[in-house]
Amino acid sequence: MVLSKLAETIEFSIDIPDSEIKTAGRIIMRLEKLSKKLDNFVDHINLLYDPFKKYNTVSEESVHKYRGTLWDYRNKVIENFESLKDIAGVVVKDMKSFNFDTHIVELVSAFTDEVGDIEDQVKFLTDAIANYDHTSYKDNITSCAEAVKKEVAELNKLIYDRIIDHMNSNILGKNWVEKKHIKFDESEPAVSRLYKEREERLKNIME
């Protein structure tokens, strides 16, 4: 009983350094920015994917007629992805400042692997766009685009469900109230309430 009360008290007494709180906040901000850019990246992919998916056939003549446009589109896909990689690189650098946290180390590994998976699929897509003479040009592009979108969705899930959730729960401490199922009287300032609860816990341990 005494040890369990002590454990609860310690949980309420841990102070996270301001520098770590600021870094965690910066990571979340950049991840949210990355997620928005990922959504925009998919929107750009859909500019080609949607019409190719809609129509049963795309003639070889039309492919060759608009090959210049397709080449420019391909280059824009590459440019957009390079922009995503730049943000992801900064995120990884910031996250490595928490290398004492084994869970964050695992998240960094999962994050870099997922970005690498997207890069691989983007390479397949851009190669498919440039392969104008492929006998199944339309189908090749739609399948490659779907693979890119799948990997992007998995990265977005990783960002929100695992990385941001971990930062909020374990560094910024945004969810500790909900996890402890504590209800506060709104008429009393939160800091005062926390102080009184902590003092009461300490008192119970000493008794």
Image: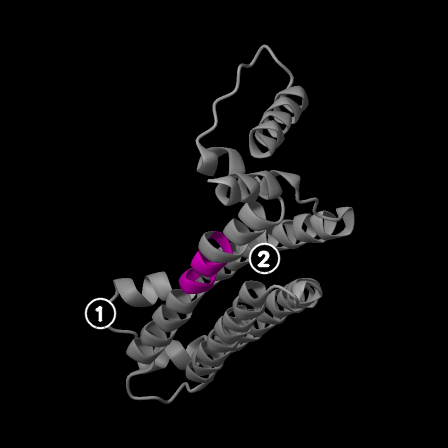
Compare residues 22 and 193 and report the one nearer the observer: 193
Left or right for 201, reference 58? right
Q: Which residues are magenta?
A: 153-160
Which image quarter: residue 55?
bottom left
Which residue reaches farthest top?
187
Q: Main secondary structure of the magenta part?
A: helix
**Quadrant that contains the C terminus:** top right
Q: CA distance from mark 2 to mark 1?
A: 34 Å
Which residue reaches farthest front?
207
Residue 73 position within the rendered picture, expressed as x and y whole percent measured from the top left: 52, 70
Which image quarter: residue 46?
bottom left
Which image quarter: residue 124?
bottom left
- At 66% from the left and 25% from the top, the residue drawn is 195
Mark sitting earlier along the chain (2/1): 2
Circle 2 packing at 10 Å, graded few (<14), some (14-19), many (20+), is: many
Residue 24 position within the rendered picture, expressed as x and y whole percent measured from the top left: 66, 52
Is 202 one of the magenta-colored residues? no
